[in-house]
Amino acid sequence: MTRPPLKLPFEYSDTPDFRVLDLEPDGVRCIPVLGRTHLKAFPGHVTSEEHVHEEVIEISYCQRGELVFDSMGVEYPFYPGMVFVSRPNESHHLRVFPKGLLMYWLFFRIPKGNFPLLSLPQKEARWLTSSLMAMPRRLFPGGDRIRLAFQRVFGVYDAEPRGTPQRTLRLRLAVLDLLVAVLDASAEAPETKAGSKLAQVVEEIRADPVKPLSIDELVSRLALSPSNLIVQFKRMTGLPPLAFRNACRIDLAKRELKRGKVSIAALAGKLGYSSAQNFATQFRLATGKTPRDWR
């Protein structure tokens, strides 16, 4: 079973500075990108273009260097030993790109239908996918286990002869070990009951940011005081509840504007803004551009 090639905002390459590999031809059809960025010298800083990945979860691990990911208007300091996770359709970009950087990253391509996932039984494949989609944290310590797991995948890629069954098997096992290590690291700090419920609320807002949001309802649902609700929400997302919902609406607006199929006035109504002017104001505050300029 084959799938169309993934649309990438960059080129595949294999140089000492940038290794951007495709594991799908090797039979690992859920990993269209395995990357390592190793910059021993670099003149100044670089800000990458803001982008989204519609079909994939992006998982990055920093071994050396100090970076900042900007996702949906929230800054995430990305230091050595940390893992950063970007979910499908979440806009993000790298704001700092210093010399001396050593970073590993991969794209996990979300299976569709009965598409095989690492040759796992269907129940196990569903569990792995749903667990990766529902990770409660997007920035968390990864430690040596994840660093070694990334290095093991690259080691198998380089050492095993191409076109052999052992290459495919060892790559699948190494990738599976890496993904499970990421899940374990994300869940290492036990969630409280309220924290689990809050993670569910966050995912509901991401899935439908147009739905009205009531602080009173959240306080009742999560059994938290209003002040504690804001503290816990900011700890998980970086923003208070209403600001997070608006960031998700702006993110949805960006995608709709890129498609170019709806007028700005109609989009403002679709997203629940009181007027096109209010939408334009909120959009400019979040992005520095008007909706028309963004399109």
Image (cartoon, helix red, strand yellow):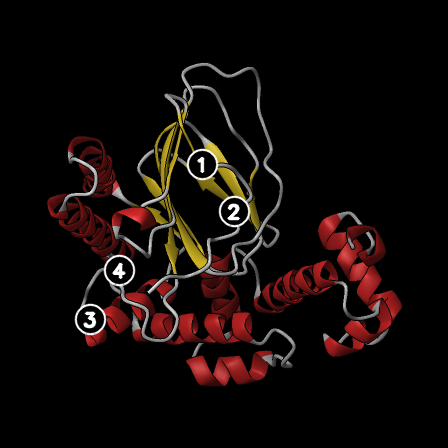
Label 4 sits on a secondary structure element that is loop
Give the amino acid type for the residue marked by disc 3 in the picture: Glu
The image's mark for residue 12 is 1
Alpha carbon distance from label 1 to label 3: 30 Å
The image's mark for residue 257 is none
- Dot 2 surroundings within 10 Å: few (below 14), some, or many (20 or more)? few
Q: Which residue is mark 4?
A: 187
Q: Are marks 2 and 4 in contact (CB under 8 Å)?
A: no
Residue at image position (65%, 77%) is: 210
Q: Earlier in the sequence, mark 2 or mark 3?
A: 2
Alpha carbon distance from label 2 to label 1: 9 Å
Q: Are marks 2 and 1 in contact (CB under 8 Å)?
A: yes
Closest to the observer, 17 or 95: 17
Q: Earlier in the sequence, mark 1 or mark 4?
A: 1
Residue 138 occupies which quadrant of the picture?
bottom left
Question: Disc 2 vs disc 4: which is toward the camera?
Answer: 2
- Dot 4 surroundings within 10 Å: few (below 14), some, or many (20 or more)? some
Alpha carbon distance from label 3 to label 4: 18 Å
Alpha carbon distance from label 1 to label 4: 32 Å
